[in-house]
Image (cartoon, rainbow, N blue to C red):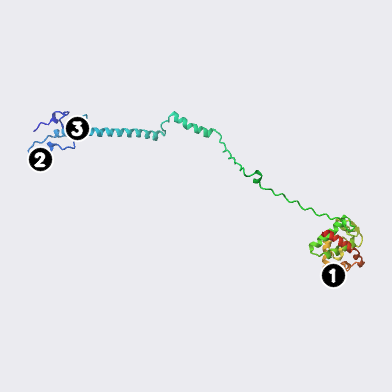
Amino acid sequence: MRNDGTLDDQCGLGGSADRSDDTPSTDRSTSLTEPSAPRLSALGFLRTRLGGFANPLAPRPGRTRLAVATGAVCCLGLVGFTQVGADAVGGTKAPAQPAELAQRATPDVASRGIDRQPPAPVAQTADPDVSPSATKKPVAKPKPKPKPKRIAPVAGLDEDQMDNAKAIVRAGRDMGVPRRGLVIAVATAMQESNLYNYASGVLPESQNYPHQAIGWDHDSVGLFQQRPSSGWGSVGDLMDPKFATHQFLAALEQIPGWQDMALTDAAQAVQVSAFPWAYAQHEWRAEQVVDAILG
């Protein structure tokens, strides 16, 4: 048996501790190939395999570099784990520096403590080429209502008579009656009521309506002295100059050829008066009044 330094000196520099375990031992390969060589005892084999652990301070260049790198990685991982663990367990982060805290606090205080001001309106610059009056839209002035044309009385009539004559002419124009029919109507009213709106003393009811005179010719009322009892209309309607004119002209238009008849004959055909020739005397005055109203 050969002398193995590992059996007597575990810390010797020439032992198996200075060899890597990855390098196959010459003694072991020899023992396997030479049957005649004496075998190591079990204690010697264990000393040989565990010799590297017996002297951890023995210099091993390859393993030294690996150990240093591994240690550095472990240190970095431990620091990171410590930081993450502190955040997860305590829920707090590392306190920031005072300067950073002051910088963060400044905008926070300004945004919460200062009243927010609305944005300033943008001033619009006036166009020097456009005058201020040109930018304003012209306001349309309301048109004044036309005043009714005042027609002075003619043919010796007063204001009340002229107003009643105008009511007759306007009512006839609304009906589409030609000028000849208007002259006949005005002349008839001149003869029957002298162009005054008459109430009746026999019908006290007629005095409840606007009137200028009171007559006593049976129940005759209004400008044309129409009688309610003869079917011309109610007392209140016949006291209205417009309604009374409508009734007279409607009856006149029912007479065949009335346009070609003499004025007195046309008026008598409607009124059936006891004095049929009396209407003719008012013809020229009636024409003057109608012309003044029609203008």
- Residue 266 sits above or below residue 22 on the image: below
Disc 3 to disc 2: CB gap under 8 Å: no
Which residue is denoted by mark 3 in the rendering?
52
Q: Quadrant of residue 26?
A: top left
Three-letter amino acid code at the position of disc 2: Thr
Q: Residues within 10 Å of mark 2 (few under 14, many from 20)?
A: few
Q: Amino acid at mark 1?
A: Asp
Q: Residue at x 25, y 33 (%)?
A: 65
Per the image, label 2 sits on a secondary structure element best described as helix
In percent of width and height, residue 267 lies at 87, 66
**Residue 22, image x, y percentages:** 18, 37
| 167 on left or right of 76 | right
Pointer 1 or 2: first along the chain = 2
Q: Farthest residue to the left: give it.
A: 36
In the rendered image, is residue 33 in sight? yes
Residue that carries the numbered disc 1 in the rendered image: 260
Marks 3 and 2 sit apart, C-alpha to C-alpha, by 25 Å
Give the labeled residue for mark 2. 33
Residue 25 or 194: which is nearer the viewer? Answer: 194
Pointers 1 and 2 in contact (CB under 8 A)?
A: no
